[in-house]
Amino acid sequence: MSCEKKPTPVVGERNILITSALPYCNNVPHLGTLIGCVLSADVYARYCRMRGYNTLYVCGTDEYGTTTEQKALLEHCTPQEICNKYYTLHKEVYDWFDISFNYFGRTSTEKQTEITQDIFKHLNDNGYIYKDSVEQFYCEKCDKFLADRFVEGVCPFCNAPGARGDQCDSCQKLINTVELINPQCKVCHSVPVRRSSEHLFIDLPKLQDKLGNWANETMSKYEWPNNCACATKTWLNNLKGRCITRDLKWGTKVPLEGFENKVFYVWFDAPIGYLSITANYTDDWKKWWMDNEHVELTQFLGKDNIVFHSVLFPSTLLGTGESWTMVRKLATTEYLNYEDCKFSKSNGTGVFGDDAMKTGIPPEVWRYYLLINRPEQSDTVFLWNDLMEKNNNELLKNIGNLAQRTLTFAVKNFDNKIPKKITKITEVELNCEKEIKELYKEYLNAMENVKLKEGLKIAMAISSVGNKYLQDTAAWKTIKSDKERAGDEIYYALNILYFVSLVLDPYIPEFGKKVREQMNLPAIPLPNDFGLLLEGETILKN
């Protein structure tokens, strides 16, 4: 889904800029990708819009680098053809999951080249780029230097097999490719040899003071998650120059004499994609990305991408000397695993976006399950029986029950209308109101601090209060002797249902939409407090 109106920051108002880590376009996204960045960011974006904040949510496919070249080799086509194919597949999956991007773009664009090269030139002019010779693996059989993801071997840190030449999936440590034990070329499986190649580096030690001051202040002020803060501090304590070029053809060309045959390393290039994707969406992109005072940037990502967003990308922006919008909140997650193993398309394990689309299970159920199972503090596990249990015992028995009982009762007993606005507030309503007000205060606090799992649990707790109110008042009994009081009770229950549709809207928007359609009422911005929101006597839709 795509929002039509293009938001613009306004001084004096809340301006929220949201990004999801850009997924590689070499495969169909799996559920871990969805909950780790895309779906989580969608919930926050929907919440911000419902609070009336000027909100821009951008994402897109990360299309350059070795993963794309590698996939193109496997599928016997060009990198651009791979990008076109998987961009479409990603878009289809996200549309099905009802992700409300303002814009879903891609990095293989002219804007990406223009902005990346401009940022590099500023870094180079400011003295933060240096040259150095690097020992790389060269495959004599393929007759080319092997970029990091074209090499695989045993991790030098944890001895896990199958470690890539840039990072180990098992221990998450970044690897210098030539440190791999028992390396192999991933294309032909021969053993590569070492050769020297000149590359460009960003001088992180020279940026130590700027980066350290910014990072320490930001992670403290905005309470970065523990995994994020720990990984960032570890890097800050041992900053080294980081190579930002690769011997590849598919990528953003390096605008420097002697380096015309090289491209930028994907993790130098990819985060700049947030800027270029925004620039492809709106000519006012600099109003979002060059206003650190008035724009609040929140970025969503998995734990394997932390240092790229907390150290490398901020260093790149700080080194230009320009007034870029810097990240405030980093919303990171641990891993979502599948049953007793990891998600892996090649191994046939896990649930991928296209798989979910074929199950017949509605997107709302998937959204709810992934969000209530969001791996915020530690890894969580996807289990099929747990998915079914949460659908039956939480969605259907809680919010489904509240909606069905209240709407059916009103249709049957009050001429297909919401009863007139309650006039006699009793102690049971006052107690209910007090409980919901307290829960809603906690909900707003959780959502503002991007504690999305907590926010969902609170929203479901508000629905439970509604169900308890129905049981305590028993309007189906009251109506036998006092129809006016029964009308007050069902009005109040419908008022709670309408409120529940609003607080759940960021999470399961289709539920809220259906409830409000049946109530013949529009959505409204999330209020500052709970109260009587319904005017009463609105005709319901059967």
Image (tube, rainbow, N blue to C red):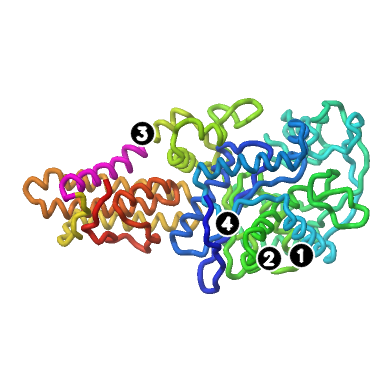
The amino acid marked with disc number 2 is Trp
Residue visible at 82% across and 40% down in the picture: 147
The residue identified by callout 1 is 320
| Rendering coords of residue 14 (x, y %) | 51, 67
Are circles 4 and 1 on residues that touch, CB within 8 Å? Answer: no
In whole angstroms, how far apart are the C-alphas of marks 3 and 1?
A: 53 Å
In whole angstroms, how far apart are the C-alphas of marks 4 and 1?
A: 22 Å
The residue identified by callout 4 is 18
Tell whether 32 sits left or right of 25: left
In whole angstroms, how far apart are the C-alphas of marks 4 and 2?
A: 15 Å
Tell whether 534 sits left or right of 177: left
Kindly state the secondary structure of the residue where label 4 is placed: strand
Tell whether 445 sits left or right of 427: right
- Does the magenta portion include 119? no
Q: Nearer the viewer, residue 3 or 296?
A: 3
Q: Earlier in the sequence, mark 2 or mark 3?
A: 2
The residue identified by callout 3 is 392
The amino acid marked with disc number 3 is Asn
Residue visible at 39% across and 31% down in the picture: 389
